[in-house]
Image (cartoon, grey):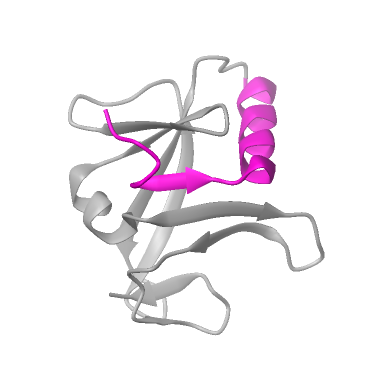
Amino acid sequence: MGDERLVKLTAGAGQKVSSLLAKQGRANGVLRMAVIGGGCSGLQYKMDLQDGPASRDILVESSGVRVVVDPKSALYVTGSELDYVEALDGGFKVRNPNAATTCSCGESFSA
């Protein structure tokens, strides 16, 4: 069990994730937030809706949503905030204080 010092969702992100979980019929589902290799800066975020946490996941509740992060990804996302923006170039945006550089599209980063 973790807390919002690991990852925090804004109210907008919480509402969007909640509505996506409801549409998928996963009332008790979770948002998995992970960091994987790839993208033009070396690391990129991967987000997925799942039925529940895995055995070693760190579970955080934020803005009414249960978020799970694996221990390896937690090293990269600690202190991050996930926001959702309704706009032409909107969508989910991660503000990560651990990112040394980000690419111009904001989809990948280096630590």
Q: Is residue 4 left or right of residue 28?
A: left
Closer to the camera, 20 or 95?
95
Quadrant in the rendering for residue 43: bottom left
- Please tell me whether residue 97 is drawn above or below residue 67 in the rendered image: below
Residue 99, given in percent of the width and then of the height, sits at 36, 73
- Please tell me whether residue 79 is drawn above or below residue 28 in the rendered image: below
| Residue drawn where x is 49% and y is 64% of the image | 95
Residue 60, given in percent of the width and then of the height, sits at 38, 33
- Please tell me whether residue 99 is drawn above or below residue 48 in the rendered image: below
- Please tell me whether residue 99 is drawn above or below residue 44 in the rendered image: below
| Residue drawn where x is 42% and y is 53% of the image | 46
Q: Which residues are magenta?
A: 1-24
Residue 19 colored magenta?
Answer: yes
Residue 37, given in percent of the width and then of the height, sits at 29, 66
Q: In which quadrant is the N terminus drawn? A: top left
Q: Is residue 61 left or right of residue 98?
A: right
Instruction: Count how many numbered circles sit on residues in the image.
Output: 0
Q: In which quadrant is the C terminus drawn? A: bottom left
| Residue drawn where x is 57% and y is 33% of the image | 63
Residue 92, given in percent of the width and then of the height, sits at 61, 55
Residue 23 colored magenta?
Answer: yes
Closer to the camera, 3 or 31?
3
Closer to the camera, 64 or 20?
64
Closer to the camera, 2 or 84?
2
| Residue drawn where x is 26% and y is 52% of the image | 73
